[in-house]
Amino acid sequence: MTSTTQHTPTLSDDGLELVERPEDIPAFGTEEEERAYWETHTFGQGMIDRLEPARAVDPRLPPPRACPPYCATTSGCLSAALIGST
């Protein structure tokens, strides 16, 4: 008898399964399969930590815009997190 270990997915606050490694993303046969997958999955911190700044990938891109004034008072501002300002 072979014992198999069940993978218990880690879920985001929204109930989406977190993808931590590129190798955890399956090969998709169609765009429909990919759409269905990403409706139930999202990047986990492991994937986010692997991201490079966009300009490192393509230096032709413009620099990020400054955060609008209202962001300084908005917790969880993505713009502030990406450019390192609050």
Image: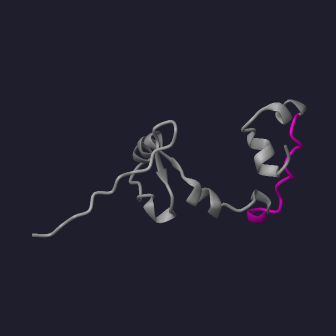
Residue in the picture at 41% in, 49% down: 30
Position of residue 76 measured from the top left corner of the image (x, y, whole percent): 72, 38
Where does the C terminus fall, quadrant-wise? top right
Judged by its main secondary structure, the magenta piece is loop
Residue in the picture at 75% in, 35% down: 75
Position of residue 71 measured from the top left corner of the image (x, y, whole percent): 83, 34
Where does the N terminus fall, quadrant-wise? bottom left
Against 30, is 55 above or below? Answer: below
Q: Quadrant of residue 61?
A: bottom right
Position of residue 43 measured from the top left corner of the image (x, y, whole percent): 55, 51
Residue in the picture at 50% in, 43% down: 12
* Residue with the most extreme bottom position: 1
Pick the residue in front: 30 or 34. Answer: 34
In the displayed structure image, the side of residue 50 where residue 64 appears, left or right: right
Against 47, is 69 above or below? Answer: above
Q: Quadrant of residue 6?
A: bottom left
Pick the residue in front: 53 or 20. Answer: 20
State how the image is colored: one colour
Residue in the picture at 82% in, 51% down: 84
Position of residue 2 measured from the top left corner of the image (x, y, whole percent): 14, 69
In the displayed structure image, the side of residue 63 where residue 58 appears, left or right: left
In this picture, which residue range is highlighted in magenta?
A: 56-68
Number of disc labels: 0
Against 47, is 81 above or below? Answer: above
